[in-house]
Image: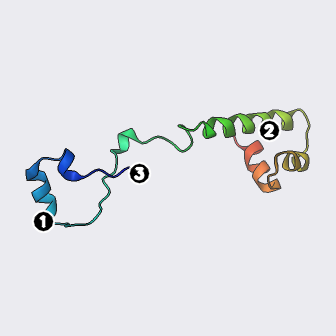
Amino acid sequence: MKYVNATAILPEALIEEIQKYVQGETIYIPKPETTYQKWGTRSGTRKMIDDRNRAMKASFKRGVSIDQLAIDHCLSVETIKKIVYTK
């Protein structure tokens, strides 16, 4: 997270209004919820996990056992069950 001096970007009247509530503190102003991105979308991690899960489901349908999938993907048997049995 990058910090910016409020005097560099905010109008004086707004700074004075904020100072009524907080002085000399660091405050966080969140993004609007409409600009949120889901976890892993920027880094590509979400796509990687989705691809892995699709491959696991396909392997399971071809007859690979849950125990073997757990070993191959270094995941618990319970996690594999959650992945292969979800729609």
Viewer-closest of 61 and 40: 40
22 or 49: nearer the eye?
22
Badge nearest the viewer, 1 or 3:
3
Give the residue number, with chain letter if any, for mark 3.
1
**46 on left or right of 28:** right
Element marked by disc 3: loop
Distance from Cα at disc 2 to Cα at disc 1: 56 Å
Number of marks in picture: 3
From the top left corner, tell me how far across and down residue 55 is, in percent: 78, 34
Query: What separation in Å lies between label 1 and label 3 (alpha carbons)?
Result: 25 Å
How packed mark 3 is, by other alpha carbons closer than 10 Å (few <14, some 14-19, many 20 or more), is few
In terms of secondary structure, where does tag 2 sit?
A: helix
Q: CA distance from mark 2 to mark 3?
A: 36 Å
Residue at horizontal 89 percent and vertical 32 percent from the top:
62
Does residue 21 appear to the left or right of 50 in the view shown? left
Q: Which residue is mark 1?
A: 20
- Coordinates of residue 32 in the picture (x, y in percent): 33, 44
| Circles 2 and 1 in contact, beta carbons < 8 Å | no
Ranked by sequence position, the earlier of labels 1 and 3 is: 3
Q: Residue at x 87, y 47 (%)?
A: 66
Residue 53 x/y as whole percent: 73, 39
Q: Please tell me which of labels 2 and 3 falls first in the chain.
A: 3
Q: Quadrant of the C terminus?
A: top right
Residue 60: x percent and y percent? 85, 38
Is 68 left, or right, of 77 in this rendering? Answer: right
Q: Amino acid at mark 1?
A: Lys
What residue sits right under mark 2 in the picture? 56
Q: Amino acid at mark 3?
A: Met
